[in-house]
């Protein structure tokens, strides 16, 4: 059975934070489904790059059937924070015991879902420090249980590689790392 990943996109997503993990996970042979959180398959990123999602999130019968949930950051996060159905999906996914990856501002969605607590180890974009004061500002990626967080666009490749390691183990991570010349 294939390993499946659900990546959520909304207008204003950070392009590098979405495309680097999608690309790397697909190189590792994960089936990555890109879902639009709007009613349009074409989603415009913060730098005006348009990506075409595979489907609408509302059209997915069972989003909890995926093995990993990936949440890119960018200004899109602030709109998603206001949507209870997105926060509930994140909470339900966490309750299923499966991993969730969140980068840049997206750990704020984990915070809103009650998954980041004052005792959590995590990182995120420095602008989230008022709400997530315990973030590790010098770590590109932090894993705490099922949560994998990362700082931002500049750490998107390390984030994608950490997601591969979580799903497939260190051998597959090293294989993909080597194939893209991401030195250890």
Image (cartoon, helix red, strand yellow):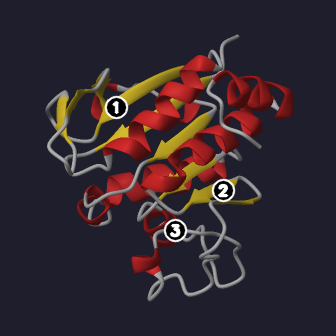
Q: CA distance from mark 3 to mark 2?
A: 12 Å
Residue contact between numbered discs 2 and 1, judged by CB atoms under 8 Å? no
Q: Earlier in the sequence, mark 2 or mark 1?
A: 1
Which quadrant of the rendered structure holds the C terminus?
top right
Q: CA distance from mark 2 to mark 1?
A: 20 Å
Q: Earlier in the sequence, mark 3 or mark 2?
A: 3
Structural crowding at the residue carrying mark 1, measured as other residues with C-alpha within 10 Å and reported as few (<14), some (14–19) or many (≥20): many
Where does the image place residue 57, in percent across and percent down from the top left?
32, 34
Residue holding disc 3: 124
Where does the image place residue 78, in percent across and percent down from the top left?
27, 66
Secondary structure of the residue carrying tag 2 is strand
Residue 35: assigned label: 1
Structural crowding at the residue carrying mark 3, measured as other residues with C-alpha within 10 Å and reported as few (<14), some (14–19) or many (≥20): many
Where does the image place residue 84, in percent across and percent down from the top left?
33, 60
| Along the viewing direction, whichever of 118 and 182 lies nearer the viewer | 182
Residue holding disc 2: 147
Q: In the figure, residue 134 lies in which quadrant?
A: bottom right
Q: Which residue is at a point 32% across and 65% down the rendered structure image?
A: 81
């Amino acid at each position: 059975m294939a390993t499946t990943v659900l990546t959520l996109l909304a207008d204003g997503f950070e392009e590098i934070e979405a495309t680097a993990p999608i690309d790397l996970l697909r190189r590792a042979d994960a089936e990555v489904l890109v879902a639009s959180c709007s009613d349009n398959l074409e989603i415009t990123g913060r730098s005006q790059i348009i990506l075409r999602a595979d489907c609408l999130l509302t059209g997915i019968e069972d989003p909890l059937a995926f093995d990993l949930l990936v949440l890119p950051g960018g200004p899109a996060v602030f709109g998603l924070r206001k949507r209870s159905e997105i926060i509930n999906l994140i909470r339900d996914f966490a309750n299923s015991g499966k991993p969730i990856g969140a980068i840049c501002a997206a750990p704020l969605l984990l915070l809103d879902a009650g998954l980041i607590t004052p005792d959590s180890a995590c990182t995120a974009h420095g602008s989230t420090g008022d709400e997530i004061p315990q973030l590790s500002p010098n770590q590109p990626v932090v894993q705490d249980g099922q949560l994998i967080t990362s700082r931002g666009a500049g750490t998107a490749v390390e984030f994608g590689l950490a997601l591969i390691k979580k799903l497939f183990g260190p051998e597959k991570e090293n294989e993909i790392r080597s194939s893209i010349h991401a030195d250890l």
